[in-house]
Image: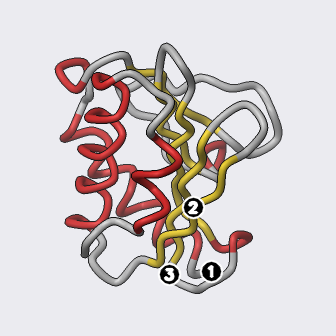
Amino acid sequence: MNPNPKLKKFLKPYDKGIQELTVELRNFVTNLVPGANELIWDNYNAVALAYSKSEKLKDAFCHIAVYSKHVNFGFNRGSELTKGPLKLEGTGKLIRHISLKNLESFPEEEISKLIRQAVEISEN
């Protein structure tokens, strides 16, 4: 799936490394879950991308939040995911995430497993 044209516009103020990281994470999700809907908005302090099997934000299984110095890859119902070797951050009721500054630090295998589980949870 090609990125929404708004994404390029929204990412323009960020440095090249953050832009590339965001696009790579986006491609990772859309390749893993090809039927996912991509919801994009420019929030007051971050660009946000959410992925859902429906067109509703409340059904999103994961999200990407773009900040000036890092990108968070998160799970909307992360507190419900099975605990594994990857330590997700967050103390709220539901959302959990990891912070990334580059793609080299992205734990692809562990995140793939969590995304599959998060999709299942979001469909219930």
Read off the residue under disc 2: 40
Real-space Cα distance between discs 1 and 3? Answer: 12 Å
Which mark is in front, 2 or 3?
2
Vertical position of residue 17 compared to residue 119: above or below: above
- Is the Cβ of the residue at disc 1 closer than 8 Å to that at disc 2? no
Residue 113 vs 120, above or below: the answer is: above
Q: Of label 1 and label 3, which has the lower sequence position?
A: 3
Earlier in the chain: of badge 2 and badge 3, it is 2
Amino acid, disc 2: Ile
Q: Nearer the viewer, residue 86 or 24?
A: 24
Count the marks: 3
Name the one closer to the observer, 124 or 34.
34
Q: Position of residue 40 (x, y in %)?
A: 57, 61
Please, which residue is most extreme toward the right here?
A: 93
| Mark 1 residue crowding within 10 angstroms, few (<14) / some (14–19) / many (20+) | few
Rendered residue at 27%/51% (across/down): 112
Q: Which residue is mark 3?
A: 53
The amino acid type of the residue labelled 3 equals Lys
Q: Closer to the observer: label 1 or label 3?
A: 3
Question: Helix, strand, or loop for circle 2?
Answer: strand
What distance separates the C-alpha of mark 2 from that of mark 3?
14 Å
Q: Secondary structure at mark 3?
A: loop
- Crowd around label 3: few <14 · some 14–19 · many ≥20 (10 Å): some
Do the CB atoms of the residues marked 2 and 3 lie less than 8 Å apart? Answer: no
Q: Which residue is mark 1?
A: 124
Q: Position of residue 79 (x, y in %)?
A: 66, 43
Q: Considering the image in quadrants, where does the C terminus appear?
A: bottom right
How much space separates mark 1 and mark 2, taking CA atoms?
Answer: 23 Å
Q: Give the position of the N terminus as an image quadrant.
A: bottom left
Asked if residue 2 lies left or right of residue 117, the reply is: left
Picture quadrant where residue 44 is located? top right
Q: Residue at x 28, y 22 (%)?
A: 17
